[in-house]
Amino acid sequence: MNKTKILIVDDYRENIRALSELIAAPDIEIYSAMNADQALEHIAHNEFGLVLLDVQMPGTSGLELAKIIRSVKKYVSLPIIFVTAHHRDSDVIFQSYQTGAVDLLFKPLDAYMVRAKVQMFVELARQKELLQQHVAELEHLRIEADAANVIKSQFLANMSHEIRTPLAAVLGFSELISKINPENKETKELSSGIERNGKLLLRLIDDILDLSRIEANRLELENTQFDLADLIRDVESTLSFRAKEKGLTLKFNAPKKFQNHYISDSTRIKQILLNIVGNAIKFTSHGGVDVDITIENNSNENKKDNFLIKVNDQGIGLTEEQQQRLFQPFGQADPSTRRQFGGSGLGLVISRQLAKALGGEINLLNSTPGVGSTFLISLPLERATDSNINKEPAKKMVENLQQLENLKLTDKRILAVDDSPDNLTLISFFLKNSGAEVHFAENGIDAIDEVKKNDFDLILIDVQMPGMDGHEATDKIRKMGFTKPILALTAHAIRTEYDDEYEKVGYNKILTKPISRTALLKELYGYLG
């Protein structure tokens, strides 16, 4: 521990010597000054725990010197004790405290009183130093933690890319295999198994990435207008097949009429509902799942309504002890639950954090082993006003794969750029019957050469490639005067500073791998059809 520095300011050397001897201690280092200039010089170059300042000095008085010291922001909290012989002068006492003095010592000095007061400020200085060290240590730990979070995020982003790239090929080829001989039951069953397990792996990757975003406070929400009725129907349609496969009933009970148009992150709301209702189906082996939806309309002054979803299942239920482990990362009721039902145990914790980010909450209302559980999701939704409801006629969408097969891209010229031969082969098969003329390039440099030689209607380009990546190639292609659509293909699922360059580079849209044939064809027909 460093010694506490104390500055004594007095125009009489004898007074300085006497006061120095009076307060001398092993943990104190004493500095002295006989005028204001010397005092300010010391203060500028040292960090003092206390200043003992004589009130009456020729030239600049102690009171004036205190005002000068206090005028500097750095020294506003520097403790100053005035030493004065004016024991009964109320004006001096008042002016002393007005200049910021913490105390006064009156001559003749009481040795015990002086030592006690000085020692108190020495202890305060010591505690301040300890606190500063502690703050510095915490700041160092914070910097290390932030750096570790950045490294973790980068690692997860890279691992996501490395896993998604081959997974894109696996899911894509399994989709193609199922189309080769759709009447062959065995082929269809095998390709469905590949696709189902590939999607489970993809879901696990997405869950881990979501958890990473949440822990790093990097969760991004997109507030857009959406139709709540359409969202509910979409969730019901997605989960009905899963319930039917298990022989369960799935009932969505919603009001017949309610305001449809709201502003929030519909993607995250859908993710929450798919997780919670999907969990209810997962842990229910007989009976069914009821989803009761209520819209609580607030007053006209409040532009938000409460979206309440009560999910009641007839599943395995939970004991009191098991309920305590809910909403914990990678946590499930017990190990046997994971063995029997599978899953990463991330769905509930991610859903609750997403709900909180949206201003809502998810709670377990009740649960009984062997009887079932009831969860309540509450989300505030901002009502879309007449002025911000999109009244433009909806674009005609491609409804199903049959329509996609009937639409053609005849005479359209497409450039596909990817360093993975498997992905290029996959795109080739995806577009085989579209009527489009497809050219291929394995890197950014080759892509630029192709653009120089051909007039393309659209470019599909991978982002991460050796040599010249998609960002640099797209930027150069745009500068060459190419104004037609460029769609980025990326296996990155975490938005980083690197990914934020998407908007600046000149892409029309970013497509995340793996992408299905149906999804890719929909995008292409959207730009070229």
Image (tube, rainbow, N blue to C red):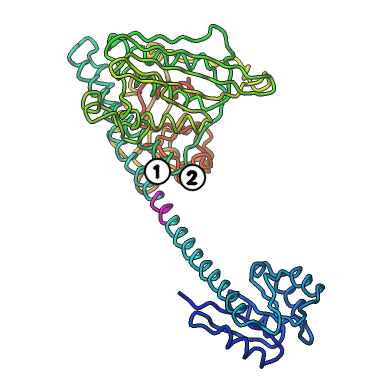
- Magenta region: which residues? 144-149
84 or 215: nearer the viewer: 84
**Is residue 435 visible in the rendered structure shown here?**
no
Three-letter amino acid code of the residue under disc 1: Gly
x, y (%) of residue 373? 36, 19
Three-letter amino acid code of the residue under disc 2: Lys
30 or 279: nearer the viewer: 30
Side (left or right) of 26 relative to 52: left
**Magenta stretch: includes residue 215:** no
Q: Is residue 187 above or below residue 169?
A: above
Q: What residue is shown with label 1?
A: 444
x, y (%) of residue 28? 53, 80
Q: Is residue 256 above or below residue 47?
A: above
Circles 1 and 2, Cβ within 8 Å, touching? The answer is yes
Density class for disc 2 (Cα within 10 Å; few <14, some 14-19, many ≥20) is: some
Instruction: Check disc 2 and report its element: helix, strand or loop.
Output: helix
Q: CA distance from mark 1 to mark 2?
A: 9 Å
Q: Is residue 141 above or below residue 104?
A: above
Residue depicted at x 51% and y 37%: 482
- How many numbered marks does the figure carry? 2
Q: Quadrant of the N terminus?
A: bottom left
x, y (%) of residue 63? 76, 76
Instruction: Check disc 1 and report its element: helix, strand or loop.
Output: helix
Secondary structure character of the magenta stretch overall = helix
Which of the two labelled residues, at mark 1 and mark 2, occupies the earlier sequence position? 1
329 or 444: nearer the viewer: 329
Label disc, if present, on residue 305 of the rendered structure:
none
Q: What residue is shown with label 2?
A: 476
Side (left or right) of 524 relative to 430: right
Residue depicted at x 54% and y 6%: 256
Residue depicted at x 34% and y 39%: 160
